Amino acid sequence: MDVVLPLDRMTTAEKLRAMETLWADLSRNADTFESPAWHADFLRERQQRIAEGKETFVDWEEAKRQLRERHL
């Protein structure tokens, strides 16, 4: 089944509502969803970088602030 949305005519708010609806539907069956193999590989690499001190983190509130500043 192909689903075609008129993305070029949708407002940002409409697109966000569509995404939220899709996410809510996917989340209902989260226990049956298998992550792709590359995801486990990525997480292992990330853990290794953390152990080596090569990974840094930003507080969630700080991350949101930085993202908002980028889009101003």
Image: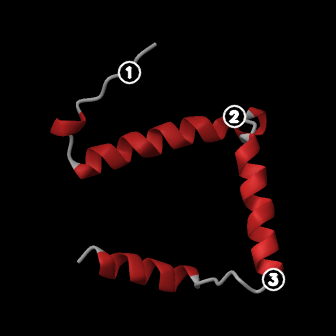
Give the amino acid type for the residue marked by disc 2 in the picture.
Answer: Asn
Q: Which residue is mark 2?
A: 29
| Secondary structure type for disc 2 | loop
Which of discs 1 and 2 lies nearer the camera? The answer is: 1
Query: Where is residue 67 drawn, in percent x and y?
Result: 39, 76
Q: Is residue 29 left or right of residue 51?
A: left
Residue type beneath disc 1? Val
Image quadrant in which the C terminus is located:
bottom left
For label 1, the SS is loop
1 and 2 marks in contact (CB < 8 Å): no
| x then y, percent, for residue 8 | 18, 38
Residue 15 quadrant: top left
Q: Which mark is residue 3?
A: 1
Q: Earlier in the sequence, mark 2 or mark 3?
A: 2
Q: Quadrant of residue 19?
A: top left
Relative placement, left or right, of 31 versus 3 is right
| Among the two numbered marks 1 and 3 on one chain, the one whose residue lies closer to the N terminus | 1
| Label drawn at residue 52 | 3
On screen, residue 36 above or below 57: above
Residue 40 placement (x, y as % from top left): 78, 51
Along the line of sight, the residue nearer the viewer: 23 or 34: 34
Question: At x 45% / y 46%, what residue is drawn?
Answer: 20
Q: Mark 1 and mark 2: span between their CA atoms?
A: 20 Å
